[in-house]
Image (tube, helix red, strand yellow):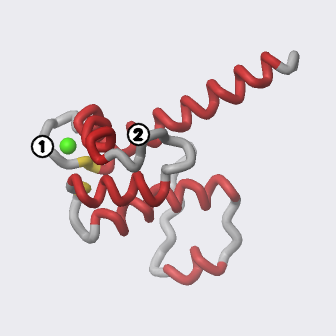
Amino acid sequence: MLVFKRQEGAKEKFVTKLVTNMEGAIKTVVMQFLSSARGKESLGGKNFQKLVQSQLGNILSDTDSSSAVKDMMKGLDDNQDGKVSFQEYLTLVGYLANSLSEQKTQSAAASGQ
Ligand SMILES: [Ca+2]
């Protein structure tokens, strides 16, 4: 069975040890949420907007529009508490990953591969 290998008591170990690109990407996704949430469980509107604007401006349109970001936040807010939880944030990550994958598939098809 494949299970998560806990990084036991070694913050430094994880940093100094080589990580693969994919491990690094997963870590980035998690750390971005945690640092944006500033110790809270969920992202409030302001922190969500900051995260989207500072980190996702190249793959999302209209990140400068606070009403567009608010709309996206509403779409993600499954339990309608006005905040974006980690699970809800993962929906956004999944959506972006899916969109990227579709785009790659389409451009591969267009170039005849
Ligand atoms: Ca929520």
User: In this picture, is 77 found above or below 83?
Assistant: above
Under mark 1, the amino acid is Asp
Q: Which residue is mark 1?
A: 81
Q: Amino acid at mark 2?
A: Leu
- Percent across and percent down for residue 103 are 65, 27
Callouts 2 and 1 close, C-beta under 8 Å: no
Which part of the image, by quadrant, shows the N terminus? top right
**Label 1 SS:** loop
Q: Quadrant of the C terminus?
A: top right
Position of residue 77 relative to residue 23, above or below, is above
Q: Residues within 10 Å of mark 2 (few under 14, many from 20)?
A: some
Residue 79, percent from left and from top: 16, 36
> In the image, residue 70 lies at what x, y percent?
25, 42
Determine if the C-beta at disc 1 is less than 8 A from ligand 1.
yes
Horizontal relation, residue 43 to residue 7: left or right: left
Residue at horizontal 27 percent and vertical 70 percent from the top: 38
The answer for how far apart the CA atoms under marks 2 and 1 are is: 17 Å
Identified at 25% across, 70% down, the residue is 39
Residue, x 51% and y 81% (percent of image)?
10
| Res 92 label | 2
Instruction: Relative to 90, say whether 33 is above or below.
Output: below
In the figure, is residue 55 to the left or right of 21? left
Q: Residue furthest right?
A: 112
Quarter of the rendering containing residue 111: top right
Looking at the image, which is closer to me, 45 or 79? 45
